[in-house]
Image (tube, rainbow, N blue to C red):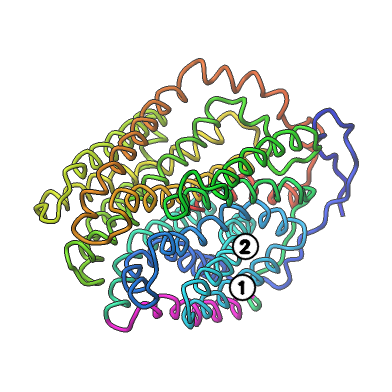
Amino acid sequence: MFTTVEPPARGARPRMIVNRELRTGKASPKGLVLAICCLSLFIVSMDVTIVNVALPSIRVDFGASVSDLQWVIDGYTLTIASFLLLSGSMADRFGRRRVFQIGLVVFSLGSLLCSIAPSIGFLIFARVLQALGGSMLNPVAMSIITNTFTGAKERARAVGVWGAIVGVSMAFGPLIGGALTESIGWRSVFWVNVPVGIAAIILCAVFVPESRAAVARRLDPLGQLFVVVALVSLVFGLIEGPRQGWSNPLIIGLFLLAAVAVALLIRHEGRTREPFVDLRFFRSIPFSSATITAVSGFAAYGAFLFVNALYLQDVRGLSAFHTGLYMLPLAVATLVCSLISGRLVARFGTRPSLVLAGSLIAASALVLTTLTIDTPNVVLLGAYVLFGLGFGMINAPITTTAVSGMPRSQAGVAAGLASTSRQTGASIGVALAGTVTAAGAAGVIGAPFAVATHPLWWIVIGCGAVIVILGIVSSSAWARRSTERIAHLLADEPAAETTPPQAESVGTAKSVQTQGSVHD
C-alpha cells in the first residue's frame, strides 16, 4: 500500500488517502487482453450503425411510425450518452474487469431480447437495456487497455488498434446489417452479438486482470439524474413533437422540463466538491468548442445515416444489402480519413482538419438539397464520399481540442465529456431527422420523402458551418488565453508527483480513457 495526497476539489483541503494496489492476478498475454477489449468495442460500435439499414424492415413488420424508428436508434445512443461517465466512475471504484463483465452480460441480454422482440415498444426497451450494457464497455475497456500497456510506445500502438476497430465497425455496420437483413432478416443483426458477448465474458474472466483507480471519484447521483432528465426530455420532445403537435401541453412541458433540469444541473454542479460534470471546463474556449463541434458533427452523421437508409430503400426501392453497398463509399472514405486524421492534427494542429471536415460535410449536404427520387447515382455517391471524408476527419481534432491545455489528471474527464457530446449529438441528429422529414412529408414514406429531406440538409449545412467557425476560433490566441486563465483551478498539486509507479499507470490510463472511442 502507498500513501498519497489527493488533489483538492475547489479549495478543499488536501486529504490523505491510501491507494489500492492493482489486483493483477496471474500474468495475461497483453495481445489477448487487447483482442478481448476490441471484441467488445466492435459489437458496441457496430450497433450504432448496423441497425439503420434494418429500419424499413422493422417498420413493415411492426407497422411502426417514423418516431418509433427514431426511438429504435435514439434509445441506444441516448442511453450511452447518459451513462458513459457514470460507468467509467463505477469501474474506477468497483473494479474495471467486474464492471466490464457486467456490461457484457447486460449488452448480450439486451441483444437477445431485441432479436425476439414481439412489438416495437419491446424492441425500444431492449435497445435501452442493450445500450446500458454498452455504456459499461467502451470507456472501461480503454481503461483496461491503458492499464495493461504501460509503456508509452506499446500503449500508443494499442490505442491505434482500438481506434482502427472503431472506424471499421462503424463504417461497415450498414453493409453487414444490409447483408444480414436481406439474407436472414432484421432480427439477425442482434443475434450476432450474443455468441460474441458470451465468448468475451468467458475470455474476460480468464485472461483480463482486475484493476481499480488509485483515487476513485465520488459518485454524484443527483448530477447524473439531472443529465438524464435533460437529455431524455429534449429528445423526447423533438421526436414526439410532429405526432403530438408542437402546441401540445406535453411537448411544451417536456422542453420546459429539459430547461429546468439544465438549470438545476448548473446550480448543483457548481456547489459539489466532485461534480458529475465539472463546469469549470466550459470556461475554456477550446473545450467548449470541442463539445459543440462533437454535437454538431455527430448530429449531422446521425441524421445522414437515418434519412439515407429510409431514402434508399423506401424511395429508390433498393434492398437492404444494396443499401449497404451504396453506403460503402461513405464507409471507406470515413475509414481512410479516420486513419490519417490523427497524423494531420499532430503535424498541422486542429484548425486545418476541422475547417476541412466542416467544409466537406457542408458540401455533401449542399449536393443533397437537390435530392429527388431519380437523383443520378454519380451525384448520390459523390455526396456520400464527401460526407465520409469530412466525418472521418473530425474525431481526432475533437479529442485533441477537448484535452488541450488540461492538466493530465483532468484529461480523461475532458475526453469523456467529449465522447458524451458525440453520443448526445447523434441522438439529437436522429431526432431532428425524423422530425423535419416527417413534418415535411406529413409522415408519409415514399416519393415525397425525398423532397421532405431538403430542409434537413440545410440544417446539416449549418452544422458544417459551425464546425468550420469553431475550428478557427478554438485554435486562436484568444481561445488559448481562456485555457490559461483557468489552468490554476484545474492544476495538479505538487504532492501528486509523489504518486508511486503503480498508481501513476492508473492515472495515465484515465488520461486517455476515452480518446479512442467514437460515441464513445
Q: Residue drawn 64% across and 67% down? A: 100
Determine whether 197 is above or below 209 in the image: below
Mark 2, residues whose alpha carbon is within 10 Å: few (<14), some, or many (≥20)?
many
Q: Quadrant of residue 498?
A: top right
**Crowdedness of circle 1 by 10 Å Cα count: few (<14), some, many (20+)?**
some
Which of the labelled discs sits on residue 136, or is there none? 2
Tell whether 173 sits left or right of 272: left
**Camera-nearest residue between 5 and 84:** 84
Front: mark 1 or 2:
1
Image coordinates for residue 228, horizontal then vertical, percent? 64, 51
Q: Say which amino acid is labelled 1.
A: Val
- Per the rendering, the mark at residue 106 is 1
Residue 392, label in figure: none
Name the residue at 82% across, 56% down: 20
* Image x and y of residue 112, in percent: 52, 80
User: Which of the two residues, 442 or 358, is positioned nearer the viewer here?
Assistant: 442
Q: Are marks 1 and 2 in contact (CB under 8 Å)?
A: yes
**Picture quadrant of residue 207:** bottom right
Say left or right for 80 vs 224. left
Q: Residue at x 68, y 29 (%)?
A: 280
The local secondary structure at tag 2 comes to loop
Magenta part of the chain = 183-204
Element marked by disc 1: helix
Q: Residue at x 11, y 52 (%)?
A: 375
